[in-house]
């Protein structure tokens, strides 16, 4: 019996090649999307799950209340907190300190090796248990001036065959002439880890060099804790929340602590009001929902086609029933067909996935291999395919098997109102999904281009950041500057103390007359020189720039409009302002400039003429002459920093880097929407083809009676167009709701105008009209005698 | 063998209610060959469908082979049908995706006969219907007469006690039509009870008794033997 089912299924597929192929293709596209999204989501979820007792390892975050009731959350802690947590808080088992460290240069034969690493306390090895291939971490803390490195580091530094050499006991030297003895080599950290380093030096070294780190006011280190067994994160959080407030001896503070499980640090990295507020998890969710919707589209295609074909199948059903088939027999038969279609779609999808995987990896920046084709994965997929097949086939199966044989034998099953309604409802549903996706993709695209093209207050193109190296900002910098400006392609240069796109340096110390000391306002600070404004292109709104000739200007300040606002100054020029070691006046006001990401509002910003603090150079290069300019920069760098590595970064690239997830989601949503459109179009195409075939005789008779092609076109398209417009009406508010929610992630965002919705709808309708028109025209143009004869 | 009393059957659409059978009663004995005649739309097919257990009835009672089947559910009806009843339709109703052999084999599959037995039985019937040489053809590749012979073969393959034929010659020319009538007569001679709907007085002459209908009711009953 089963064989008979398969046989008839295959013959049916052969006979209705086009319908079957569209069905399979739709399924294949849907399955391809979901496999790709599944792989991506799996990869995302895999982060940080390498830790053995993952639930009890937490990252320590601090909440810093600022003016206006807002709270900033940072992954930084003061060093003395470690001892306090260890001694006074029994819920905490171990505390590990880890410095925040810029890349370090190590001397190698003829140049430098740049590596990322940290200074860390010994507990980091107890908590994470990084496996060692040579030596171990014990020796690291038994001696001074020691270092452990990763296998990767070892192979860069000692050569590919470092394994064959005895590198334990060798000394390696940084470009600051610090030498460290290698006491161990650890396995490279897992790729799926937010914690990444290639070397570790004992934290004590850092403290020796920077004794000020011992101060409670310096939130400079990362901290990981391991909780005592059986203590929940929630409970621990309650206990240690006020650890800083209760234990800081020198002054009263407001910083609260909270613990984030290490397993969540990757996916939940946004904080609002001192609480977790999503992060990449939102994209995991968006794409998972997209995968489900796309699958739904594909299976709706199948349902629609199968029930539409019911008229053709109803004779077969009727005959089988007459001959004694039970409903159950027929259901099994139809389900086998849908599982077969899904199966073929699945095989096709696997082919497409293996072809697309490299592209997909390039798009998402992942390294997903074919290794996921494990027997377990295949088994899971097969189960999934059978389920999907059953889900898609269940309605047609029940519908077809319930047809009365007496009616199906006379072809009476065709004009069932409920069934037609159901089919239309499915189609409307499908178009709602598609349209929501189109509107969503368009909005995401617009928001992301808005970010990319937004005037952030200065021209980020052709702006290069280079390290200062050995150049002394108060010494030979002037000579360097003079020489550099003479080189071709260089338009300007200014020393700065931190990345212009991500100024982490903020303080609430500034004082001015009439300051309300009950309010804490945080200002970001840029230390630079008079060339800053001309190099960046930031314009003065009021007042004047720093003047090199006026020694007093090093105590004066330029502020932005946001700072003016929080200081509540009508006429700020000449007003007193002071902080840290300097007391001076406000001499200029600049427009608000987007220093940090567009996710957050513009912050109060103060520029100091403070050369000793600077450590980097910002260089304006001539458009079209960037290669030349970089060469000039390198030449000069090599002259002033003999033997040191030359690094440079384009600010525009860094800017893009800030919106990596948005750019990724833009691309993914774009491609998946295209696929959704394709699937829906396939469905529409075959449904229209089917309907026009059904009405071939009617069309012929109408033509014989003198109907024009336009009349017929209008007659046949009307029904579909009404449905599509209905879908649009329903889709718009749904899309609006979701996009509005997503846009709340941005402090600066596009306004959702009706134009966007109209255009998205118009595009959908245009595509639909094209598909409907093509098919209907074909039917309308057909020779009427032919279809009349075959009846 | 069949006894229907006061059969009622209605069809309701949104607009109208059609009475397809109205207080229809009649009896058929084992081995009889009945012809049902009447104008189009008078309820002949409806009657056949009910007797063939394809459709349920809205009123009256139905006794089949001594069993009261009036209130049988679909499952029970299907079971009774596949063992006892064979159908022949005007439009043949062969399954386009199956070959001649497979079409004829289908009823045997549904009654769960073994494969080897099925093959033997199908060949036997195909020989008898003189259609053996076309066993691997698909229905579309056959002429109307040949298709109807296949349909008859399929109707009799499981040795049904009752054969229901709804205008079996309606789509055939007269020589092909006669051929099918000969087949039915032969089957009747071998013991099958036959109820046949027809428009043709010529075909009706092959039967033992003619039942004439009008507007869902029986008008006359004439015995020819
Ligand atoms: N499925 C149906 N729905 C509605 N009316 C039907 C249906 N089948 C038959 N009828 C109506 O019932 C009456 C009897 O039909 P039928 O038994 O097919 O007549 P006959 O076979 O004698 O031509 C007719 O008026 C027909 O229109
Ligand atoms: Mg009829």
Image (tube, coloured by chain):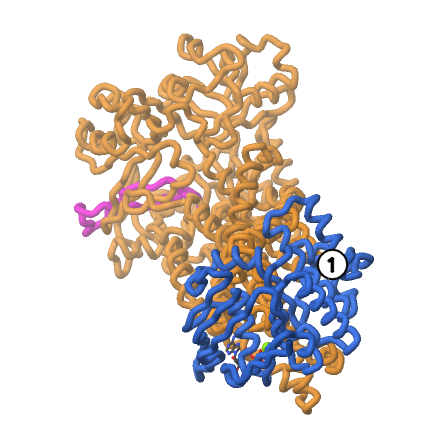
Let me know if residue A449 appears in the view. no
Q: Residue furthest front?
A: B225
On whether residue A518 falls in the magenta region, the answer is: yes
Chain shown blue: that is B
Which residue is rendered at x = 17% and y = 34% of the image?
A252
Which residue is rendered at x = 61% and y = 76% of the image?
B209
Identify the element where label 1 is drawn.
helix
Spot occupied by residue A41 in the image (x, y as percentages of width and height): 49, 42
Which residue is rendered at x = 33% and y = 27% of the image?
A56
The answer to whether the beta carbon of the residue marked 1 is less than 8 Å from any atom of ligand 2 is no
Please state the chain letter of the residue tagged with numbered disc 1 in the rendered image.
Answer: B
The residue nearer to you, when weighing A547 against A367, is A367
Quadrant in the picture for the C terminus of chain A: bottom right
Q: Residue furthest right?
A: B133
On screen, residue A389 versus residue A787, left or right, reads: left
Spot occupied by residue A728 in the image (x, y as percentages of width and height): 47, 70
The residue nearer to you, when weighing A321 against A724, is A321
Q: Residues within 10 Å of mark 1 (few under 14, many from 20)?
A: many
Spot occupied by residue A317 in the image (x, y as percentages of width and height): 59, 62
Q: What is the tally of numbered marks visible in this picture?
A: 1
In the rendered image, which residue does mark 1 sit on?
B100
Per the rendered image, the range of residues in magenta is A503-529
Display colour for chain A: orange
On whether residue A740 falls in the magenta region, the answer is: no
Determine the image quadrant of residue B10. bottom left
Residue B163 higher or lower than A391, as above or below: below
On screen, residue B66 versus residue A89, left or right, reads: right
């Amino acid at each position: 019996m089963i064989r008979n089912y398969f046989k008839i299924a295959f013959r049916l597929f052969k006979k209705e090649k086009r319908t079957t192929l569209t069905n399979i293709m739709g399924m294949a596209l849907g399955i391809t999307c979901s496999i790709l999204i599944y792989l991506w989501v799996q990869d995302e979820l895999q982060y940080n799950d390498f830790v053995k007792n993952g639930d009890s390892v937490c990252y320590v975050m601090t909440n810093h209340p600022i003016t206006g009731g807002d709270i900033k959350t940072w992954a930084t802690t003061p060093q003395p907190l470690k001892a306090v947590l260890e001694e006074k808080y029994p819920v905490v088992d171990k505390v590990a300190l880890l410095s925040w460290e810029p890349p370090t240069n190590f001397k190698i034969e003829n140049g430098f090796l740049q590596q990322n690493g940290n200074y860390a306390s010994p507990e980091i090895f107890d908590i994470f248990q990084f496996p060692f291939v040579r030596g171990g971490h014990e020796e690291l803390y038994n001696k001074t001036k020691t270092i452990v490195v990763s296998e990767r580091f070892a192979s860069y530094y000692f050569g590919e065959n470092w394994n064959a050499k005895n590198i334990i006991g060798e000394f390696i030297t940084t470009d600051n002439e610090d030498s460290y003895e290698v006491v161990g080599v650890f396995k490279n950290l897992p790729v799926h880890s937010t914690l990444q380093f290639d070397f570790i030096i004992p934290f004590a070294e850092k403290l020796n060099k920077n004794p000020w780190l011992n101060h409670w006011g310096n939130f400079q280190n990362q901290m990981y804790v391991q909780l005592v067994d059986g203590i929940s994160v929630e409970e621990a959080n309650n206990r240690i929340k006020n650890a800083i407030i209760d234990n800081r001896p020198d002054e009263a503070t407001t910083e609260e602590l909270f613990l984030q499980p290490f397993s969540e640090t990757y996916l939940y990295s946004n904080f609002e009001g001192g609480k977790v507020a999503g992060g990449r998890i939102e994209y995991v969710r968006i794409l998972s929902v997209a995968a489900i919707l796309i699958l739904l589209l594909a299976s709706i295609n199948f349902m629609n086609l199968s029930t539409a074909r019911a008229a053709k199948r109803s004779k077969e059903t009727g005959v089988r029933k007459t001959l004694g088939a039970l409903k159950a027999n027929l259901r099994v038969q139809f389900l086998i067909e849908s599982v077969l279609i899904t199966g073929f779609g699945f095989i096709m999808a696997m082919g497409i996935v293996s072809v697309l995987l490299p592209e997909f990896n390039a798009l998402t920046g992942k390294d997903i291999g074919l290794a996921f084709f494990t027997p377990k994965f295949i088994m899971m997929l097969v189960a999934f395919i059978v389920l999907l097949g059953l889900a898609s086939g269940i309605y047609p199966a029940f519908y077809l098997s319930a047809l009365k044989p007496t009616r199906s034998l006379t072809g009476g099953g065709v004009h069932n109102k409920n069934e037609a309604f159901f089919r239309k409802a499915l189609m409307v549903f499908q178009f709602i999904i598609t349209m929501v996706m189109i509107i969503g993709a368009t909005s995401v695209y617009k928001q992301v281009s808005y970010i990319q093209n937004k005037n952030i207050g200065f021209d980020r193109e052709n702006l290069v950041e280079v390290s200062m190296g050995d150049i002394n900002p108060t010494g030979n910098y002037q000579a360097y500057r003079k020489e550099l400006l003479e080189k071709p392609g260089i338009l300007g240069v200014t020393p700065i103390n931190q990345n212009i796109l991500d100024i982490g340096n903020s303080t609430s110390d500034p004082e001015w007359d009439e300051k309300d000391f009950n309010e804490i306002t945080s200002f970001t600070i840029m230390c630079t020189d008079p060339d800053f404004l001309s190099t960046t292109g930031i314009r003065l709104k009021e007042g004047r720039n720093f003047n090199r000739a006026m020694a007093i200007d090093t105590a004066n300040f330029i502020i932005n409009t946001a700072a003016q606002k929080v200081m509540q100054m009508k006429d700020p020029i000449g007003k007193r302002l002071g902080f840290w070691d300097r007391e001076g006046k406000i001499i200029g006001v600049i427009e608000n400039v987007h220093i940090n990401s567009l996710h957050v509002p513009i912050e109060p910003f103060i520029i100091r003429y403070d050369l000793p603090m600077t450590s980097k150079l910002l260089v304006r290069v001539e458009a079209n002459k960037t290669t030349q300019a970089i060469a000039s920069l390198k030449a000069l760098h090599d002259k002033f920093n003999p033997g040191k590595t030359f690094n440079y970064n384009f600010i525009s690239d860094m800017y893009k880097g800030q919106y990596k997830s948005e750019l990724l989601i833009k691309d993914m949503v774009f491609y998946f929407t295209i696929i959704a459109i394709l699937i829906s179009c396939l469905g529409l195409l075959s449904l229209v083809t089917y309907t026009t075939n059904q009405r071939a005789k009617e069309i012929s008779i109408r033509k014989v009676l003198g109907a024009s092609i336009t009349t017929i076109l209008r007659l046949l398209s009307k029904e579909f167009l009404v449905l599509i417009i209905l879908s649009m009406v329903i889709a718009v508010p749904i899309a609006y709701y979701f996009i509005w929610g997503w846009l709340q992630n941005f402090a600066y965002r596009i306004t959702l105008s009706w134009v966007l919705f109209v255009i998205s709808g118009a595009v959908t309708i245009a595509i639909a009209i094209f598909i409907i028109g093509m098919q209907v025209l074909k039917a309308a143009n057909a020779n009427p005698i032919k279809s009349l004869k075959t009846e | 063998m069949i006894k229907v009393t006061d059969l009622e059957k209605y069809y309701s659409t949104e607009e109208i209610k059609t009475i397809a059978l109205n207080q229809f009663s009649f009896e058929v004995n084992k081995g009889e060959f009945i012809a049902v005649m009447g104008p189009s739309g008078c309820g002949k097919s409806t009657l056949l469908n009910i007797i063939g257990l394809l459709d349920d009835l809205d009123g009256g009672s139905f006794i089949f082979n001594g069993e009261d089947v009036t209130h049988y559910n679909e499952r029970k009806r299907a079971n009774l049908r596949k063992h006892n009843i064979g159908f022949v339709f005007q439009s043949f109703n062969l399954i386009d995706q199956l070959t001649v052999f497979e079409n004829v084999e289908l009823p045997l599959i549904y009654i769960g006969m073994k494969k080897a037995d099925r093959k033997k039985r199908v060949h036997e019937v195909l020989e008898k219907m003189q259609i053996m040489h076309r066993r691997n053809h698909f229905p579309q590749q056959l002429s109307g007469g040949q298709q109807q012979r296949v349909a008859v073969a399929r109707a009799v393959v499981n040795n049904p006690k009752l054969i229901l034929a709804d205008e079996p010659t309606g789509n055939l020319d007269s020589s092909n039509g006669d051929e099918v009538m000969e087949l039915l007569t032969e089957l009747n001679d071998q013991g099958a009870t036959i109820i046949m709907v027809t428009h043709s007085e010529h075909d009706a002459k092959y039967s033992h008794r003619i039942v004439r209908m009008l507007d869902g009711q029986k008008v006359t009953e004439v015995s020819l033997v």
